[in-house]
């Protein structure tokens, strides 16, 4: 135990960085729970998507979206979700699955949807990268 304290004393910057990263990870997870967001694995998302009232919102860039996306997904930029227009207002009564490239930026977009009054909002855990990795179908149409 004495060596741990000696290491920490000799490497304050390294230990401080580690504590900061650990704190940010904990804060991110706590905020996800507080905001009431659901994270779905690709397999769980399939059941969600098969609900007739479900809408998949892909906030990836247009270029990434055109490379491949979930069938029937709508490509909406995250900035549109921050200040919703009439089209987005119509979506809030549906079950919404928010998708991005890696699953990170979808959390903030989903939080914006919750703030505007959307009832059921979920995020695809791991984003399109995980969807492809799990070998679920994509389309470029």
Image (tube, helix red, strand yellow):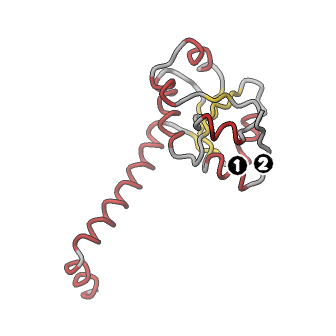
Where 131 falls versus 90 (above or below)? below
Work out which quarter of the rendered image holds the N terminus and state it: bottom left
Q: Is residue 55 left or right of residue 137?
A: left
Q: Give the camera-side residue of 79 and 89.
A: 79
Check disc 2 and report its element: helix, strand or loop.
Answer: loop
Q: Is residue 87 left or right of residue 30?
A: right
Which picture quadrant has residue 74? Answer: top right
Check disc 1 and report its element: helix, strand or loop.
Answer: helix
Q: Residue at x 59, y 41 (%)?
A: 100
- The crowd level at tag 1 (other Cα within 10 Å; few <14, some 14-19, many 20+) is many
Q: Position of residue 55 (x, y in %)?
A: 68, 27
Numbered tag placed on residue 27 in the rendering: none
Q: Position of residue 77 (x, y in %)?
A: 54, 29
Q: Residue furthest top?
A: 86
- The crowd level at tag 2 (other Cα within 10 Å; few <14, some 14-19, many 20+) is few
Q: Position of residue 6 (x, y in %)?
A: 22, 84
Q: Residue at x 67, y 31 (%)?
A: 56
Q: Is residue 87 left or right of residue 32?
A: right
Q: Position of residue 122 (x, y in %)?
A: 60, 37
Where 5 falls versus 69 (above or below)? below
Q: Give the Cα distance between marks 1 and 2.
A: 6 Å
The residue to which callout 2 is attached is 136
The residue to which callout 1 is attached is 131
């Amino acid at each position: 135990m004495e060596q741990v304290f000696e290491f920490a004393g000799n490497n304050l910057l390294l230990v401080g960085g580690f504590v900061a990263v650990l704190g940010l990870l904990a804060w991110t997870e706590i905020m996800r729970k507080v905001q009431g967001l659901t994270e779905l694995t690709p397999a769980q998302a399939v059941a969600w998507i098969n609900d007739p009232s479900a809408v998949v919102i892909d906030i990836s860039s247009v270029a990434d979206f055109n490379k491949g996306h979930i069938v029937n997904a709508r490509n909406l930029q995250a900035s549109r979700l921050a200040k919703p227009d009439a089209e987005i207002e119509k979506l809030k009564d549906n079950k919404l699955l928010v998708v991005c490239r890696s699953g990170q930026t979808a959390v903030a977009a989903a939080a914006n949807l919750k703030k505007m009054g959307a009832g059921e909002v979920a995020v695809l855990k791991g984003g399109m990268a995980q969807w492809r990795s799990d070998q679920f179908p994509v389309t470029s149409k």
